[in-house]
Amino acid sequence: MHIPKNVLIYTTILCLFLAFAQAQQTGTKKSQIETYLLNANQNGLFNGNVLVIENGEILFRKSIGFADASKQVPLTPEYRFHIGSIAKEFDAVGVMMLVEQSKLSLDDKLATFFPDLPEWSKLISVRNLLQYTSGLPEIKYQTVHNDADNWKDLMTLRQLDFAPGSQYAYNNNNTFLRRKLIEKVSGVSFKEFAEQTMLKKVGIKNGIADPTDADPLMAKSFNNDFKQDKLQAPISGWTCVNLDDLYKWSESINAFTLISPKSTKFILTPFMPDKQAGLGKGTMENERVLTHIHDGAALRYQALLMVDNSKRRTIILLTNQKHDNVYDLGNGITAILDKP
């Protein structure tokens, strides 16, 4: 039986509201968060890992549900997840690292590095790729199955959707070319650059770019019928992490471990209000990150990072059974934390 999407949305909201209402009846904020998430799990609305940092200390860290569709393997905090668009932070930061090393400039054109690309490459700057203002169309996911397929499409692309820098269009061709730019300038694969030059430097020991089904401690995504997805992506460069690693990454952004406050502000501030930048979106004041919010989805994985440094608060949700409700869950946790 087909259930209309709007009915599913209303049902989800109602279930989360009831879960939140029940959580409010329990004791400490930690126990309220636990009740809230366990109720969401029991209603089929959350399967994943959660980390809540309040006042700079771990308030809540828990795994709820299963690591794969067999329902035999419980999740633990050590499991790594695809984090979707949050993984674009690694290539955005990587590009800015190379800018700060004077190995490229924000105003350099793509043709400087990829002279074989069509004429439009003489118009698109590194800045455009970071701001999603390149005019490039979205990847053709129906026919693109690997990097070579996407390169072929770009080589035959004759016209951009708009003049670079004139409009905003969020799509993964910008991400794809940022990663290829890093490879071209650094001389190593993006996987090696991400794992050795970025993750290792900020203390991330378990992160992995482009994992396979054979890699250990990799949560597998599945649907509501517990049908498991094959671990694959149409383009390369997707870095997967666990709870603690994503928190370390977030803290490295706050501490400007890899790039300066100026560079951080550039990739934290969207080209237009309510749009996305390299780090998602956020605010800074006096060389301090105040807020940092980013979500991502891939296959049936979904992830959310919410940072409010005025309260020394970080909320991370990682799920391998997507319900498009991570913001609802994150906002519910926030409401519990903010309650007197």
Image: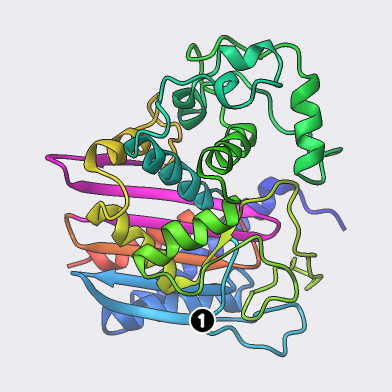
* Residue drawn at point x = 33 percent, y = 49 percent: 292
Tell me where residue 192 sits by quadrant: bottom right
Q: How many marks?
A: 1
Q: Is residue 54 left or right of 8 when viewed as pictured?
A: left
**Residue 132, position as x, y percentages in the image:** 52, 27
Secondary structure, mark 1, is loop
Q: In the image as oriented, which residue stretches furthest toward the bottom? A: 72
Q: On the image, numbered disc 1 is attached to which residue?
A: 78
* Residue 154 at x, y percent in the picture: 74, 26
290 in magenta: yes
- What's the residue at 61%, 73% (across, down)? 43
On the image, the x and y values in percent for residue 156 come to 81, 20
- As shown in the figure, which amino acid type bears the numbered disc 1? Glu
Look at the picture and state if 78 lies above or below 302: below
Mark 1 is surrounded, within 10 Å at the Cα level, by few (under 14), some (14 to 19) or many (20 or more) other residues, namely some
Question: Relative to the observer, which residue lies in front, 159 or 195?
Answer: 195
Pick out the residue farthest to the front: 187
Residue segment shown in magenta? 281-309
Say above or below: 143 vs 320: above
- Magenta segment main secondary structure: strand
Estimate the x, y position of residue 221 in percent, counting from the top left: 70, 68
Visible residue check, residue 296: yes
Q: Quadrant of residue 325?
A: bottom right
